[in-house]
Amino acid sequence: MPTYNAGKYLADSISSILDQTYLDLELLITDDGSTDPVTLDILHKIEERDSRVDVLYLDHNHGAGYARNKSIERARGRYIAFCDSDDPWTHDKLEKQIAFMNQKQCALSCASYIIFKKKKKKSVGINIAPPKITFSMMKRDNKIGCLTAIYDTQLRGRKYYMPTLRKRQDWALFLTIMQKCKIAHGMVEPLAHYRKTPEGISRKKFRLINYNAKVYQHVFGYSPIMSYAYLMLIFMPTYLTKRAITWIANIRR
């Protein structure tokens, strides 16, 4: 979990992890140079209260990908799971998803998640994870919500780290893993809640075009021209179609 001035929602997200029915876990938090006293107070208190929590404090802000990598470096467990500081999990997420991964014998998995505004009672939609995600699908558009992603270091034989991109580094990580395993599996059951906030970077999709292109350059070695061509001709039509389908589905709900 990366944190950066996240005091407003942080306690809820941390509690959702520590209250999991799957008990054999460690919560590795990397604080990315927070200046908010509320955030720092929550982190200091929780690491004193629960021995499963390990907090690393960075002296200045590096970005979420860098912070996540610092947590991955310290991880001792077989499974690496990701959760942002404002997105709570369901209480049985890890238990259900790890059992699902063992059943499928998959190295990478994700789950559906509920979209809500500020409070979980105000659901505004749902993102449904595809049951089977191929490398070709992922290359066209990211199908894996980072807040639900888990990868198995034992099946892959190593840890994987996010590239040094300021944004979209999670998609680049999943593509890198899938270059080897080719298939990821998704659970249709929602196992997390995504908090839709005005300040959330994922709401600025069209401002991320340059970072999307950099993913193609970083993971596949494409030239800038080829990266933007692939982005405009393959990524954008796929992404817009997905958004339209999600919008129609949520209207029907």
Image (cartoon, helix red, strand yellow):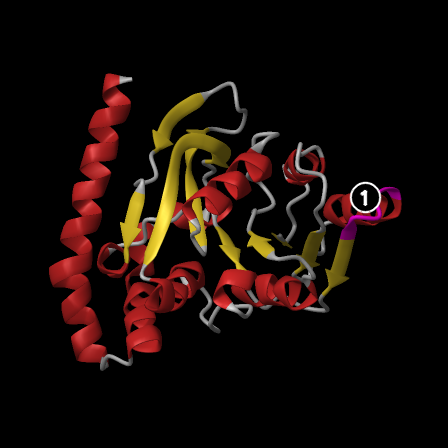
**Which residues lie in the magenta part?**
49-53
Residue sitting at x 39%, y 68%: 176
Residue 83: x, y in percent? 56, 47
Residue sitting at x 21%, y 42%: 242
Total marks shown come to 1
Residue 127: x, y in percent? 35, 35
Q: Is residue 121 left or right of residue 132?
A: right
Q: Crowdedness of circle 1 by 10 Å Cα count: few (<14), some, many (20+)?
A: some
Secondary structure mainly formed by the magenta segment? loop
Q: Is residue 116 left or right of residue 90?
A: left
Q: Quadrant where the C terminus lies? A: top left
Is residue 51 one of those drawn in magenta? yes
Asked where in the image residue 85 lies, by quadrant, the reply is: top right
Residue 25: x, y in percent? 70, 47
Residue sitting at x 52%, y 64%: 65
Give the vertical position of 123 relative to 139 (above or below): above
Residue sitting at x 59%, y 66%: 69
Give the vertical position of 109 relative to 107 (above or below): above
Asked where in the image residue 49 lies, by quadrant, the reply is: top right
Quick one: SS at disc 1? helix
Q: Is residue 156 left or right of residue 60?
A: left
Which residue is label 1 attached to? 46
Q: 71 or 248, which lies in front?
A: 71
| Whether residue 212 is visible | yes
Residue farthest to the left?
A: 233
| Whether residue 88 is visible | no
Give the vertical position of 220 relative to 149 (above or below): below
Residue 97: x, y in percent? 51, 40
User: Three-letter amino acid code at disc 1?
Assistant: Ile
Is residue 87 one of those drawn in magenta? no
